[in-house]
């Protein structure tokens, strides 16, 4: 269940769901959210409940990001294969395990990503391997 605000992340952990994070937040903020989620899961355990509040007034955190070019650039995966790999490694370093890839370059760009970037991430992340 997606969440962005600390209170929402805490509830997702209590509900027992996974936490997909958005593509607009800077990497350091994603790391903070992953850390909070992990600590909440450890502290509370996992419980199954409905994701939506009964009143239906859940507010998306996506609207809380700065509307600047710099913010968009900081959260985007673009550049040379080495630059994309560096950004993916930064996400991995803060605890991200999965990334949803949306390529405007079509199948050819996805194939290039598979050939030139993905092999660097075939092993276990250092964070998980150390645990």
Image (cartoon, rainbow, N blue to C red):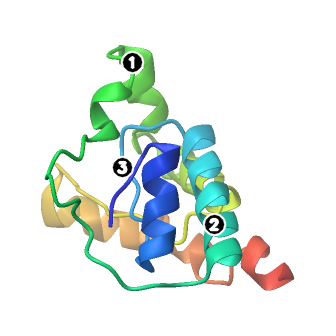
The C terminus: image quadrant: bottom right
Give the residue displayed 52% in from the left and 59% down from the top: 10
Mark 1 = which residue?
A: 66
The x and y percentages for residue 98 are 46, 70
Task: Say which element carries label 3.
Answer: loop
- Report whether 110 appears left or right of 124: left
Which residue is tagged 2? 40
Q: Position of residue 122 (x, y in %)?
A: 58, 82
Estimate how packed mark 2 is, as few (under 14), some (14 to 19) or many (20 or more) residues with alpha carbons within 10 Å. Answer: some
Point out the tag, 3 or 1, that comes first from the N-terminus. Answer: 3
Q: Identify the image quadrant of residue 44.
A: bottom right
Helix, strand or loop at label 1? It is loop
Mark 3 touches mark 1? (CB < 8 Å): no
Question: In this rendering, would 89 be left or right of 75?
Answer: right
Along the horizontal axis of the image, is 66 left or right of 46? Answer: left
- Residue drawn at x 58%, y 54% is 91
Above or below 8: residue 18: below
Image: 131 above or below 115? below
Tell me the element at label 2: helix
Give how far apart the Cα atoms at labels 3 and 1 are: 14 Å
The residue lying toward the viewer, choosing from 36 and 51, is 51
The label number, if any, that marks residue 22 in the structure image: 3
Q: Position of residue 81 (x, y in %)?
A: 49, 52
Q: Is residue 23 above or below residue 69?
A: below
């Amino acid at each position: 269940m997606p969440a962005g605000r600390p209170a929402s992340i805490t509830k997702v952990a209590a509900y027992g769901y996974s936490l997909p994070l958005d593509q607009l937040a800077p990497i350091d903020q994603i790391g903070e959210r992953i850390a909070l989620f992990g600590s909440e899961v450890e502290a509370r355990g996992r419980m199954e409940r409905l994701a939506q509040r009964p009143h239906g007034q859940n507010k998306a955190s996506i609207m809380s990001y700065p509307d600047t070019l710099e913010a968009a650039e900081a959260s985007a995966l673009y550049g040379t294969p080495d630059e994309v790999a560096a950004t993916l490694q930064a996400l991995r370093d803060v605890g991200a395990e999965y990334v949803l890839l949306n390529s405007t370059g079509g199948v050819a760009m996805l194939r290039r990503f598979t050939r030139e970037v993905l092999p660097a991430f075939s092993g276990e992340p250092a964070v998980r391997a150390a645990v």
